[in-house]
Image: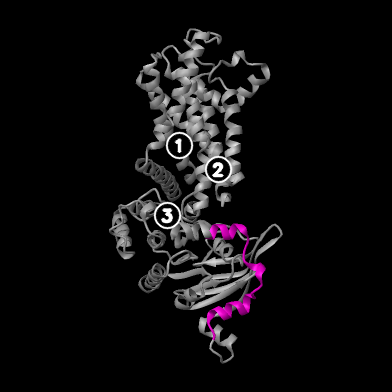
Amino acid sequence: MNILQSFFQQIYSFSHKTLVLTELEMRKLRHDPTELFTRAVQPALWLLIFGQVFTRVRAIPTGNLPYLDFMTPGILAQSVLFIAIFYGISIIWEKDLGVVHKFLVSPTPRAALVLGKALSAGVRGLAQGLIVVIIALLLRVHLNFNLLSLLGVAVAVILGSALFSTFSLIIACIVKTRERFMGLGQVLTMPLFFASNAIYPISIMPSWLQVVSHLNPLTYEVDILRQLMLAGGTGSYQIGFDLVVLTAATIILVLIGAVMYPKVI
Amino acid sequence: MKIIETRDLTKRFGQLLAVNHLSLTIDEGEIFGLLGPNGAGKTTTIKMLTTLLSPTSGQAIVAGLDIRHQAARVRKVIGYVPQLISADSTLTGYENLMIFAKLYDVPRRERENRVSQALHYMGLEEAADKLVRHYSGGMIRRLEIAQSMLHHPRVLFLDEPTIGLDPAARRTVWEHIINLRQQFGTTIFLTTHLMDEADELCSRVAIMHLGEIAALGSPQELKEAVGHGEEVTLDDVFIHYTGNELDNGGNFRDVSRTRRVARRLG
């Protein structure tokens, strides 16, 4: 009985600390929300320019979907990736300031520190999702407004943000300086983006790239979003399978992150 | 009663022996100063005692707990103010305190009370709802000390607490440190390379040089030992034990970090 009690107490304490760290990030965002707006520019450009042009070209086989519809979930996944992948830079920044030292000396489980960051990336991702949806509506993309699907989209966005931000945190803990991280961030994002089904289907890729894209978590993020966001959207996998892949990858990365985080100092 | 005890505590970074077989005992309620030039191993020592770095070899007990095997429990009973600026400048003073009250498991009923006490105690009530970005250097340091005291730790570690502060702000921080000890009986372990700071605050000091303790005692004792009857300052004692060669002034990283902190606080 006592063991059970202390087990639940630990779970409670862990979740509480995780949420405190997310609260911290949300408070920062409330004091200065400008980044939410500046980050809206990139997906807007992709949808407005790239999307509109390629819709005319009709070069990419997208089944029954207009190309713009096809790429909208891909662009949402892309902006989730782009926000999350530079999350590590804030860890390095906090290390240079001494904030990390203070967190690490507090009685907070390392995994809670990492997961708290991951969830706050999720909230930023949600804000981005809202912006992409608004732009998509203006461009008359056929979205699915089923409540359950919307909830699913939110979950997928949070998971994707958590996954890539934790990946970024691990990289930051390895490279340790801003300069090296910036270079690496660029090197990582583009392959992740282009070796996925975000703006073209996997079926048109050369076979070696198909293999890579099946190993790329972004593919599963796009796949689930494409099925949930669009009216008449189809995917390559079951939604449940996408969720399992994303969740498992996130958990593994958070555990690795918990080991790496104290090494950042 | 002993509150900190280290035995042959050693930290090696590759070829560099940062802390070499350090053995120290500190009594409860002391204000203990670890002195030494840049790169002497002061910060490494404090990082080991606060569980941020694990020692290469040797042992340390803090408040009866082993820093290696009981690190999670050590963290509950100590407070730490890093040399770098650790308050979050994009939040208000109140928010900085509240977040840490939560992370340190201060019970929900007591949180508001503890935070407003801390603000009052450190003279930050009026600035509580201002962003820390607009605080002066002295105010930031006071806020950071308040943050690290919310859970009433038994030992408070201060790494260069007044680096970069002007003399008036420095004096206010000193007064607060002395008050903390009187009011809560907190043991205070600080590092500094300001001799007047050590002279003013510390009941005992250790002078560290190249990873080892070169001298240990009360400031008075050290002065007598070096002066042989003549009037000397702690500065003379420091130079006596650490030498005044030009090449022991820390590396580029230390210096640039120190200057960065000084710029942000000043």
Residue A180 lies left or right of residue B120; in this view the side is right
Where B38 sits versus A60, above or below? below
Looking at the picture, how far across and down is residue B179, in whole percent?
A: 37, 72
Q: Main secondary structure of the magenta part?
A: helix
Magenta span contains residue B254: yes
Looking at the picture, how far across and down is residue A179, in whole percent?
A: 59, 43
Highlighted range, magenta: B232-258
| Cα separation between marks 1 and 2 | 15 Å
Label 1's element? helix
Q: Amino acid at mark 3?
A: Ala
Question: Residue at label 1?
Answer: A121
Q: Are marks 3 and 2 in contact (CB under 8 Å)?
A: no
| Cα separation between marks 3 and 1 | 21 Å
Label 3's element? loop
**Residue in the picture at 63% in, 19% down:** A210
Looking at the picture, how far across and down is residue B131, in whole percent?
A: 35, 51
Q: Amino acid at mark 2?
A: Gly
Q: Amino acid at mark 1?
A: Ala
Question: Residue at label 3?
Answer: B87
Label 3: how many residues lie within 10 Å, few (<14), some (14-19) or many (20+)? many
> Viewer-proximal residue, A201 or B235?
B235
Question: Residue at label 2?
Answer: A257
Label 2's element? helix
Residue A252 lies left or right of residue A76; in this view the side is right
Say which of marks 3 and 1 sits in front: 3
Looking at the picture, how far across and down is residue A66, in whole percent?
A: 47, 10
